[in-house]
Amino acid sequence: MSLQIALLEESFELIAGQSVELADRTLSRLIELDPQFRLLAARTEMAALRSVLFSVLYVLRRSLHNLNTLAPALETLGALRKDQELSSEHFGTIGIALLDAMAEVGGAAWKPAYVAAWAEAYAVVWGMMVGLTDSAEAQAGAVLVA
């Protein structure tokens, strides 16, 4: 799968300086989509959650030309996923919330092509994180965010 690197880089610049707003909007949208996430938010320090979210996006942005460099960070997130008992369905919901928040934060300059590019990147990263890149479960996660 070939990522749309130019679109990802271009769109990242629209949200790069707004990490707190992006994290807050993602969490708000996530709770709106699935109130179960209120429990995760209640037991997680918001500063840490914001940091993790934007760190993942930043590392992804820096690693677009060589996704293999993401492996260590994704292994850590995969362990977090297991600790928090997050399923494929949860990651689909997280993807939708993230894409919605990115579009909000990106504002009028945000293009539909950016949503498609980030949905594809999210599916690839999610698949790598859980070690299911070519499995049916990874494809289900991709469908949920597309």
Image (cartoon, helix red, strand yellow):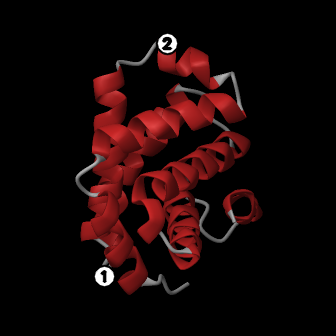
- How packed is label 2: few (under 14 Cα within 10 Å), some, or many (20 or more)? few
Viewer-closest of 75 and 66: 66
Q: Which mark is residue 89?
A: none
- Would residue 76 be visible to someone looking at this image? no
Mark 2 or mark 1: name the one nearer the start of the chain: 2
Viewer-closest of 7 and 137: 7
Dot 2 falls on a residue whose secondary structure is: helix
Give the foreground label among 2 and 1.
2
* Quarter of the rendering containing residue 70: bottom left
- Residue type marked 1: His
Dot 1 falls on a residue whose secondary structure is: loop
- Residue type marked 2: Ala
Where, quadrant-wise, is the N terminus in this rendering? Answer: bottom right
Viewer-closest of 16 and 1: 16
- Residue beneath the point at 31% across and 54% down: 72
Tell me how many marks there are. Answer: 2
Vertical side of 92 occupied by 13: above or below: below
Where, quadrant-wise, is the C terminus in this rendering? Answer: bottom right
Vertical side of 82 occupied by 118: above or below: below
Using residue 36 as the reference point, say whether residue 2 is left or right of it. Answer: left
Q: Which mark is residue 42?
A: 2
Q: How far from the left and from the top, in percent, is residue 102?
A: 47, 55
- How packed is label 1: few (under 14 Cα within 10 Å), some, or many (20 or more)? few
Q: CA distance from mark 2 to mark 1?
A: 36 Å
Q: How far from the left and from the top, in percent, is residue 84?
A: 54, 26
Q: How far from the left and from the top, in percent, is residue 38?
A: 59, 19
* Quarter of the rendering containing residue 16: bottom left
Q: Which residue is mark 1?
A: 65
